[in-house]
Image (tube, grey):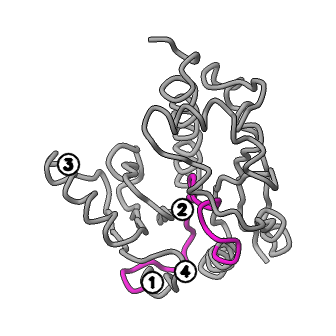
Amino acid sequence: PDGDDNPLWGRFARYFGLRTRVLDDFVLQSAGAGARQVVLLGAGLDTRAFRLDLPSDCVVYEIDRASVLAFKEQVLTGLSAAPEVKRVPVPVDLREDWADALTAVGFDPAAPSVWLAEGLLFYLPGPAETHLVDTVDRLTAAGSALAFEAKLEKDFLAYRDSPIYTATHRLIGIDLLHLFDKGPRPDSAGALTAKGWSTSMHTPFEFTREHGRGPLPEPNDALEGNRWVFARKLAP
């Protein structure tokens, strides 16, 4: 009821809503351009296979740890939920060699694909992020696309007193800063550009202004360092 004055259920929730909408649009645009394989890295409870109006011949691959996908399956079964397109869970840890697991269930590296790493990379160790980005590059054909979220600040603790972090800890007992990997972050956007991808980097606030909904910058803002990166693989 107190809207953005509540840092967790107001402002942070609107941030997640905005991010979901922007990445929905990215997936749909990529499918409209010919991608028929959607890969969700760290899929969690993602429901895009159930709610997006994707072409009927699309396949959504959901990569996450086996325990996460098992819990998700239990929830979906309880709801009698049915996906709109073919959905293929891929139970594997992204810190391991997941490429073989993905191709073993039908993913075709020679066909265009669209990938999402939504709210994922800053939880992984830096070398795991580099391996993930290199693997995506290796498994993608020209015309493929990737969207991911990055954080620019070198020291996450600089925003320890940000209302978003303190409210999350106080209201639901989760210390987000404890979950983030504290090691140095690689320049994944730069690495993709060097590999021949076209990349663009945006603040979430650009989309707040575009859609007329979502968070805007405020003092001591933990969202200020968040960047949404969109990359498309060009023909060699």
Residues under labels 1 and 3: Cα distance? 26 Å
Residues under labels 3 and 2: Cα distance? 25 Å
List the residue tagged with mark 2: 35
Residues under labels 2 and 1: Cα distance? 16 Å
Exactly how many numbered labels are in the figure?
4
List the residue tagged with mark 1: 103
Q: Nearer the viewer, residue 68 or 73?
A: 68
Lower position in the chain sequence, tag 2 or tag 4: 2
**Residue 54 to residue 121: above or below:** above
Q: Is residue 45 magenta?
A: no
Q: Residue visible at 13% across and 49% down?
A: 78
List the residue tagged with mark 4: 109
Lower position in the chain sequence, tag 1 or tag 4: 1
Residues under labels 1 and 4: Cα distance? 8 Å
List the residue tagged with mark 3: 81
Label 2 sits on what residue type?
Answer: Ala
Q: Nearer the viewer, mark 1 or mark 4?
A: 1
From the viewer's perspective, tell me whether residue 183 is left or right of residue 58: right
